[in-house]
Amino acid sequence: MSYTTFAYSALECDTVLKGANKLNVSITVTNTGKVDGTEIVELYTHDYIASIAPCLRRLRDFTRVTLKAGESKKVSFAIDAEDLSFINAELKRVTEDGKFDVIIGDQTKAFTYSN
């Protein structure tokens, strides 16, 4: 629980994740309240099409950021193909090519994955 409020802005994300590379994601978090506070910044992904019914949002990474009143900070993440994987109908871990969204707070950006 926090006694302040936070705003998210300027979500940046690579547009393509290919093979063993990493997808770089960053967002600016601002403490919009009048007191110092700590926010847990959560990165989710959404897979548009998969061989099984995917979850709407899957938590991939998170970090804690402490900000003084009025302070902003850029927070960065890096996710890879393993982070997009799931267990398929044959009970094997797979990462399928396709279109994804990265979601942080109220911000969303699309990217594609290809092996």
Image (spheres, rainbow, N blue to C red):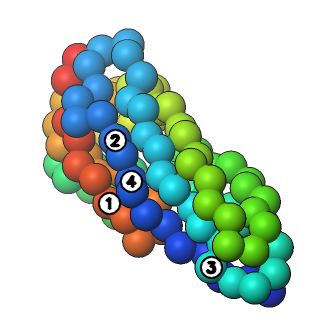
Q: Which percent across, then down, holds residue 32?
A: 62, 79
Amino acid on which disc 3 is placed? Thr
Q: CA distance from mark 1 to mark 3?
A: 20 Å
Q: Residue at x 62, y 53 (%)?
A: 73
Whichever of callouts 2 and 3 sits on the residue coming sooner in the sequence is: 2
Q: Which mark is residue 12?
A: none
Amino acid type at circle 2 is: Cys
Determine whether 103 is above or below 24 in the image.
below
Q: Distance of mark 3 from mark 4, alpha carbons?
A: 17 Å
Expressed as whole percent of the image width and height from the top left, the position of residue 49 reads 17, 48
Q: Nearer the viewer, residue 111 or 37?
A: 37
Q: Residues within 10 Å of mark 4 (few under 14, many from 20)?
A: many
Mark closest to the chain's N terminus, 1 or 2: 2
Q: Which residue is mark 4?
A: 11
Disc number lying in front (1 or 3): 3
Badges 4 and 1: C-beta atoms under 8 Å apart?
yes
